[in-house]
Image (spheres, rainbow, N blue to C red):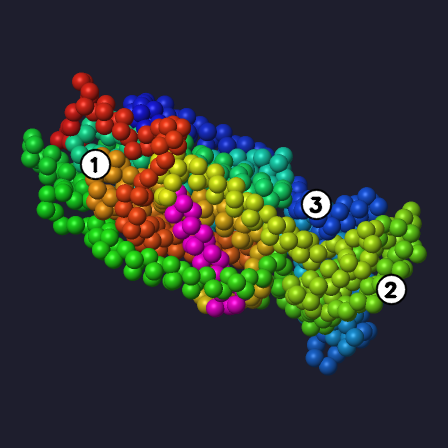
Amino acid sequence: MATFLYKLGRTAFRRRRLVALLWVALLALAGVGAATASTPTSSSFSIPGTEAQRAFDLLEERFPGAGADGATARVVFKAPEGEKMTDPAHKAVVEETVAALKSGSDQIVQVTDPYTAHAVSQNGSTAYVSVSYKVNGMELTDETREALKDAGHGAQGKGLTVEIGGDALQTMPEQGASEAIGIVLAGIVLVVTFGSLVAAGLPLLTAIIGVGIGVSSITALANVLDLGTTTSTLASMIGLAVGIDYALFIVSRYRAELAEGRTKEDAAGRAVGTAGSAVVFAGLTVVIALVGLAVVNIPMLTKMGFAAAGTVVIAVLIALTLIPALLGFAGDKVLGRKQRKAAKDGEGAEGVEAAKGVGAAATGGHDGKGGKPNGGTRWARFVIRRPLMVLIVGVLGLGAIAVPAASLQMGLPDDGVKPTSTTERRAYDALSDGFGPGFNGPLLVVVDGDKATADRTVSTIKGLDGWAAVTPATPNKAGDAAMITVVPKDRPSSTATENLVHDIRDATGDDVLVTGATAMNIDFSQKMNDALVPYLALVVGLAFVLLTLVFRSVLVPLKAALGFLLSVVAALGAVVAVFQWGWLGGLFGVEQTGPIMSMMPIFMVGVVFGLAMDYEVFLVTRMREAYVHGQRPGEAIVTGFRHSARVVTAAAVIMIAVFSGFIGMDDQMVKMIGFGLAAAVLFDAFVVRMAIVPAVLALLGRKAWWLPKWLDRILPNVDVEGEGLAESADAPGAAKPDLVKV
């Protein structure tokens, strides 16, 4: 592989104009596709194989035209202190609002009058108008949303407090500011790392191009593939992080090869052949983890995984082709000022040696002739001297952070977790105060039978505990199905409400199905739990095989997998502490604690595993390279850290910066994902890979690189260490060192 990538890098360097033109053309093509694509008309959410989904499908079949999957809104009215919503003046305002809503849009199915639908609280302080739409929230036109808001604002100015809740106000999350923050922070880290604006700009430029192509393609295909609102957010989040990191490793290796005295073209080829091999395998682990989300069998999650995986593939291809092409355009400017000066002022062998020293310092190493050891070298030597202590401290520290994960409660975010500054959250609170906490999560019971069956079901439900209200059965026109609304006593995300759902299902027959947002959340969480172990086995198993192929070792991949599990559980513990317990919630903009998003554990397993293996591949590959070339195990660890620690640290800081930028978003799901991924990268890169990994390798010694002979004969030699390149360098006619010309 290294030889093939070496040739690819040299070809891209020589034909840089053609390569750059092709990528710009792809970006333009994707941009045109996104600009001309029709607005997405669907953002469906389904959970195949669950009772809630079967009930939903039955509703669409037996109650045609009822808009079972349509958006809903609640306009909540609250009277001033000491007054009631039944007062004539307030009643007139509500009736005007109902009339305005009915005439405000042709997308409306029904608008209920609170005085005929018994939607006034017992104390008379609160009332609400329910609005049902023909289409889901993403299909509503701007005019329909404005009509809804205008109706509320019109009543607001007539002595009533009016708030609006429901998914009718759902919009695409804004991404620009979050991405900009991550890019700025990444740029600062790159400038500090490289000491050159050009070298720092290359990873940023290529990452933006890759994300631009990926997100534009998603936008262009969103309507055709029924992609959700967070798909492009996830793709840009991951694509930006890995795109910068992959380019960072290749640019860094290119500078190191120049410092060794190679020509620019040869250095580009070798950078792609060595660091590029690590990029390919690191990218494969990320793709495996993301594509593996299909195991869960939830269409939305599968599409998110495939879209993000496609963006990662683009990032890998750009790193292997566009980066060497741009390095050809950059010329000497890719080097730091001191390195350029040393190469320019030096003459002959002295100039080469001077440039080697400066160049090695710029890339995190030293000249190897008594120069001052860098931070990576000093840290590696410290770990080798005290491996057991470092291992114990690292494991116990992450174990302590992971403790809150034992109290994990899962659900899907609703209006109750939104900031109090939003009208959706205030409407949620007003309904809870006026009608009880369970009113925001009513259960919809669908009876597949006649009126007698429906009446028996109502009686059965009333014999259970945990409900606050049970409406009479509403049959369909054919009389072969009916709907029953059950309002729980407790809030939607509570254990008591979950128990009520299970009790209804246990007490009624197979012809009675429970659905609604709350039941959907419960079924979704259960499906996530059931899929976690198979998914983990698939992803870790495939990655174990891949890493065994890369490192030609059994214990190194095993250590990598166990270290990942430790870091992801610790990150999950941090998520629980902040978003469920509220620790430091104000610092991260968490105004309301609640259950952790149901997909968070399995999502973190998928994404974090792929990202964690990046650092494992980049760091340990350099150790393996040194060990293969004759160094003792301890020396190989130090060599790996001397060459890679600074760059891996910069890459981790960049990823943390990119993910942290999404913590500032209002969307609770995106905020939680950004925090969880940032925490996971922090733990995995700086505790697991930079501390626990070298400690374990030091304790294992030569055993770390053990591979059964029979397995060694079976496995193909992918040559990630670039042994083939070393042989070609000794061949007649090989490129000779020429740093003085740089």
* For residue 352, above or below residue 654: above
Disc number at residue 630? 1
Q: Residue at x 43, y 47 (%)?
A: 561
Start-end of magenta stretch: 557-583
* Mark with earlier residue (2, 1): 2
* Mark with earlier residue (3, 2): 3
Q: Secondary structure at mark 1?
A: loop
Q: Amino acid at mark 1?
A: Gly
Instruction: Report the front residue among 99 and 29.
Output: 29
Question: Looking at the image, is mark 1 or mark 3 nearer the viewer?
Answer: 1
Which residue carries the number 2 mark?
Answer: 459
Predominant secondary structure, magenta span: helix
The quadrant in which residue 555 appears is top left
- Give residue 34's position: percent from left, percent from top: 54, 35
Is residue 569 a member of the stretch shown in magenta?
yes
- Give residue 173's position: percent from left, percent from top: 55, 51
Marks 1 and 3 in Cβ contact (< 8 Å): no
- Give residue 402's position: percent from left, percent from top: 46, 61
Total marks in image: 3
User: Can you see residue 140?
Assistant: no
- Give residue 29's position: percent from left, percent from top: 49, 29
Is residue 513 left or right of 145 when viewed as pictured?
right
C-alpha separation, residue under disc 3 versus residue under disc 2: 28 Å
Which residue carries the number 3 mark?
Answer: 49
Mark 3 neighbour density, 10 Å: few (under 14) some (14–19) many (20 or more) = few
Question: Looking at the image, is mark 2 or mark 1 nearer the viewer?
Answer: 1
* For residue 728, above or below residue 477: above
